[in-house]
Amino acid sequence: MAFPAALFPSYFGAGPPGEAGGVAPAAGWGEYGQVLGARPGPRVAETTFVPRCGRTGESWEPADVAAVPFLRPNASCWVPSLVPQDILYRGVLHRKLRSGKSGAALDFTKQLGHFFVDHPEDAFGSLGQLLHKNFYLGNAKLRRQARDTTIRMTSLVEEINRLEARHGCPQQHFTSRVRWFSHLCRDWLFEVPLDLLADCVHDELVLQWASLLFDDSSTGGALAWLPPEDAGAHTGCLVYPGGQAMNQLYFQDVVVGEVPRTRGSPAQFELNGRIRQVAAAQLDGEGFVGVRSDYHCGVWKVPGRTGAAPTPLQVIRTNVPASCLTVSPHLPGELAVCTQSGAVYLWSVETGLQQLRQDPQTMFFRDHSPWRWSEFTAHPRVLSCADRTGLQCLDARAPGRCHLDFFKVGEEAGCQQGERVVLPMYLGRAHPSQHLVATQFAVYVMDERLPLVPVLKWAHMMKDPPLFAHVVPGGPGRSHKVLLGASRTQELLLLQYTGGSESACQLAGPPQKLHSISGCLQHLPAQLPHRHWLLQQRLGAPAAGLAAVPHARGQRESLLVFQLSEAGDVFYQTLTHEAAQPRAPDGEDKDEAASSASPMLEAPFGSTPGSPPGSGGEEEEEEIFYLSNLEVIVNEEEEEEEEGTPAASEETQHPEEPCASPHPLPAVPSPAAAVRYRRWLKALFRDWQELPRHTGVRGPPTISQKRLFTRKDLGPPAGTSDLHVRARQQLRRAMREQGRIRRWDLGPDPQPLPQPVEPAAWPDALSARLTAAWAGDLSHWWEERLGLNMAQRQRALRERRRRQKRARGHRSLSASFTSSVTYQSELSELSDGAPAAAPAPPLSPGHPEALPQVFTEAWGGSLAGGSAPGGSTPRRPPPSPPPAEPLLSSQTLRSRGIPKERRKMLRDYLAVCTEGPPEPLPEPPGSQPPSQGGQLCIPSSQSQLSGSQPRRKRPRMGF
Amino acid sequence: MDSLMERAAPCPAAQAGSVLLPALHLPLLPPHLYRPATSHEHKLNFRKSKEACLTYIQDAMLQKQWKRAAEFLTFYIESLEKDFSTEYMGPSEMIWRIGTEILCHHSYSSMKDFNSFIEQMKTLGVKRYLKVCLEHAFHLLCNGQTDEAYQNLSLAESWRFGEQTTAQDKELKLIQAYRGLLDYYSWSKQKNVLLEYDKEGFEDLSVEQEMHSSFRKAAVNLKEIIQIPGVWDVFVKCYVDLLEFYGDHDEARQVLSEYAYNSKFPANPNAHVYFYQFLKRHGEPKKSLISVLKILHDIVPSHELMIDFNTMLQKSKKRKKRRLGLEVIFAALDYAGWKENVKAWSCLARQVKQIIISEKHLDWIKQEWNSRKDWWPAFHFSRYLAKRNWQENESLAYEKALVAGILLGKDCKYFKYVSHQGCKDQKKRLRTLKKFVNKHSPVYLRISGLSDSSVQT
């Protein structure tokens, strides 16, 4: 290979990087870098100049508007990678910390708690066994003899459970019993000393946080392509991980074309850990695939002829996580392995491991990262060895002595301060002595023959450092295509460059952004919020790999780009070369695409176990669903799932920002792509629905109802009527089905109408006081009561008279207000409940709200304890409504129209009712049943004024 | 229609001056970009929308939607109004970079637009003036406007502003060097004119004078830059050409050896090549040529000159040099780029054949082979490669088969395959090859160390 006769001029300095920069958003634009004069021939006098950057390149246009799913979705319940929310503290403290700008607060206690819950044996094993006999967890009382040695823990456990149920509740306070227990046991209960454990958890949290900021474990990417042995054949092999934990390795034969198709079912291997990297090289007609997981590396051989099964060759285990595995492009069965301890090995399947270097320190300056990388070079016995500070070349024949500085983060390459090597790659397929070195700011093309000086440099401006790269060599006179992929942001860039042997390296054309996986979200049909959220999570998962396959049929060239996400989904996009023939007529293309799509997608999809029998009809419906693109067809079932996900809609906006930029033209995916989207979505949601509920981490959040009520609450109350039984059954069923508690038919006999409220009927002091309090002039009432001053009293009398007058005049107004209130509450109910359910007419007496009534009955029953057979008295006011949980929340109160200043009063009052055991009042039944206390505080001033109205049938103000 | 399009996509050059005019309204842009921002909150919003706008621009540019990017850039120019940023790259630099890039690709941009845009950009930042000038000159050069570029460079060279930073110093040196380069090109043009005249018997004193003044200007500037460590292939070549024309060989030699052997300079193979070519041009003795190439071999064993080097060494009478020649060719063939180089393989085959026939120095082969015998067979002599080489390049297959037959014996896959195919095709050349290998089959045992019989030295 020739060396360019003249290189572009550049300065060469030694030492640490000069300028302190940072991520500059436009650093890669508008520069020619340098120019080089070249005389086309000796005869031509005029010199022409060529720039290092900024030359026009080949034009590759995306064939579709977004990336298209290639394989059916990976197992739906993928174990999602850690997100900041998992380990960050959320709550009051967090807000305080954030305002103080003290950075992220890791939720240490939560993680420690998780440990105790997830590994109780490890945490409390031996003491648990020791104390086993002394802790009693039953409900029965302890016998006298047992009481000496045994403690009854039931109530403590219940209290703890209740605490958990109220997690996040501002009213949460620890009971003394729990406090007492923790105080008593803190020192001796734990198997692992708490300090030690805390240290470990803390260290782990810090590690996890660091990996959240930048996770380099997937460097290199876990997607590999083995091209067909001879260029004529169109069947290659795609190697990718899958499964819930990404521990399944698949070898899938793929027929390339503008629309790639799978052929046959993939060969599958189950591995012992999450697959981090898949590296492949093809030599002598055989493919060698290296697979790296944290503590294991394996190598497979894929025979050249299609259809032959891949065979595993060898596996090695490392004590420290491996950070790199590359396959030699020169010699069969040779690989390079690096571990995080700083060791570099040459691994030959025949001769085993040869250690080339063992140095925990970084090469050129000190950097804390244990990441190491190694690539092969043009010389099969020389390996490049990289850490964050640069690259060196090592000779495997004399690793101790022979090494050469190849790339340094420093002035030599014109680096910035803080710049670090992120991904080195051997570009051997494009040019035998070229290497790509990517940092978080720029990409460099290095030539082995000219160490330390980059032959090409370009600031890539990516938001996340590129972790994957793929090179597609261009033939003579053509440009080499380099694809750069970032993990977290899914960015994908296509660069072109030329030169290296006859002429100096030049960047050809501006870089081009390719579609990211998450970009297809906007082209999918509109989804219900929780599904949208699920899709967003799924499609926004960090990228995990990248592969590109050039393909040419006749004059028509295309480039297939496969992308793998951490969720295990493989998407592809096709780029077509502009110089190629114009696209085939649409109809033909579509037909081809559709026919090619169907065998690949149909076969695996159809074989899904437990596919619903009525899927045919469903499919048709979904088709409409998709093509209309705006119409949302909602069926009842889906809607029910939708309930109880208020959080989902909130979260939808959260991960949107990386793809903030809107597309100028809302282009529509091609019909073939649309078919693929539809099938993919269908399979995804089907898988998701089939998930067992308890693993439905992705589903809408649910609240365990087990801990909402104490056992006593759920136990059969004393006065059990038929209505109770039915109501309870309904309630239980609703809970079991996680459905909504809603009105149901109660049978033929409707409840008696609530009697109108007549405040005048209760002339006693308490009632008057409460009425006054409700009206908001308690102090006045008090003063009046005390008779503090006559003038005031007289004024008050006058005032009262005036008020009465006004009240008379306002009767009609107050009535209208009441009805408007009714309407309001009706509305709020509507928004809570199913939109499909017809709202009851506001004042219709025939359909009272069943649940409150039932609650009232049940609650009133347990409250009264059978003391007041109030039901029989004709004068009995309507049973007092329950201070059911939702009522106490200020939101509910607000929605009921109760002024803010009174909400607390009401709450306190109701709380007294719930907690205090009912005490039968001395008054005779009929005049003042205790539950009327609740009633009294309810009416607003308006209802008080309209109290005398007999027409008002539903005092729904709040109840 | 065209004028309409023009209006729809105003190029930033035209817009830069009329920032305050109502710009093209796009629904995507946050409305507060139009409002003057005063309060702290507004400042934040302004920053946010600036960033958003930049994101849109980036996005459009990365998708080659130059027109759209240009429209966004007209809005982004507003960010100059509140450019208090202490960031590494302020808005003015970004506008320059983005604007340049857009104008390079925008279908409606003309050279005039570009120039006027750049002129405005030059006034935007003092620190960046030289860089903008240099890039402007590059643009002019790439578009064939050498004279304008020259003017531009001269203008930039005379610019002075306070103290210079090191970066500015470097840029200034580059500007001078490029001006020197342009001087050199005009010199060589005038030289050609004069040579033509000479042929035809004319004489033109003014041209000659002009030529000499060009020489002086070029030489001064070029000499300066090549003393600073760096990769200055073009400048060195031009400077040496000037010196050679005026007969200053010592200076040229000095410059070249400095460029090649100064340890502050990067290990640039071209520096050695230029020195070698210079020495060869001036008929220097073989010894010095060999020593230059020996150093080149040490730093880049895979350089294409290694074939010349090997040929040169093979012709030598000294044993040591012939030994070195074998080393050189073996080392070159280690590299993946040389795998299918027929010339190199024939060199190796010839030398190996010579050694075998002379039956001397078999240990040379043995020593070279020792470090390669574990990987060369798989690297060069696999059956797969035999098949492919035979299909693609028969003479390569022949040379390799000879080497394989000698080094690995006649049972090696490569040799067997090629000789078998050759016999099938009735190739005479291969029959002789087979005969030769069969005749010398014991050599293989000795080379591979299988035979314990003492190796002849």
Image (cartoon, rainbow, N blue to C red):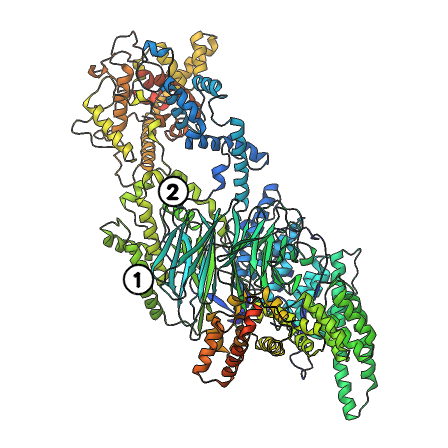
Residue B78 lies, in percent from the top left, at: 61, 54
Asked if residue A923 lies left or right of residue B230, the reply is left
Camera sees residue B184: no
Tell us which disc is closer to us: 1 or 2: 1
The residue carrying mark 1 is A599
Badge 1 marks a residue whose secondary structure is helix
Residue A903, by quadrant, is top left
Tell me: residue A274, above or below residue A65: above
Q: Is residue A308 above or below residue A762?
A: below
- Chain under callout 1: A
Question: Which quadrant holds the C terminus of chain A?
Answer: top left
A461 lies left or right of A44: left
Mark 2 surroundings within 10 Å by alpha-carbon count, few (fewer than 14), some (14 through 19), many (20 or more): some
Q: Does residue A132 lie above or below A347 as drawn?
A: above
The x and y percentages for residue B349 are: 58, 76
Q: Residue, x 74% and y 65% (percent of image)? A: B174
How busy is the neighbourhood of tag 1: few (under 14 within 10 Å), some, or many (20 plus)?
some
- Whether discs 1 and 2 lie on one chain: the answer is yes
Identify residue for label 2.
Answer: A698
Instruction: Answer with left or right where residue B220 lies relative to residue B147.
Output: right
Q: Quick one: A450 or B168, which is closer to the camera?
A: A450
The amino acid beneath tag 1 is Pro
Q: Position of residue B87 (x, y in %)?
A: 66, 49
* Quarter location, residue B277: bottom right
Location of residue A139 (image quadrant): top left
User: Numbered disc 2: what chain?
Assistant: A
Across the whole image, how many numbered discs are drawn on residues?
2
Of all residues, the one furthest to the bottom in this rendering is B201
The residue furthest front is: B453
| Residue B401 in sight from this viewpoint | yes
Instruction: State the residue in front, A553 or A710.
Output: A553
Of helix, strand and loop, which one carries label 2?
A: loop
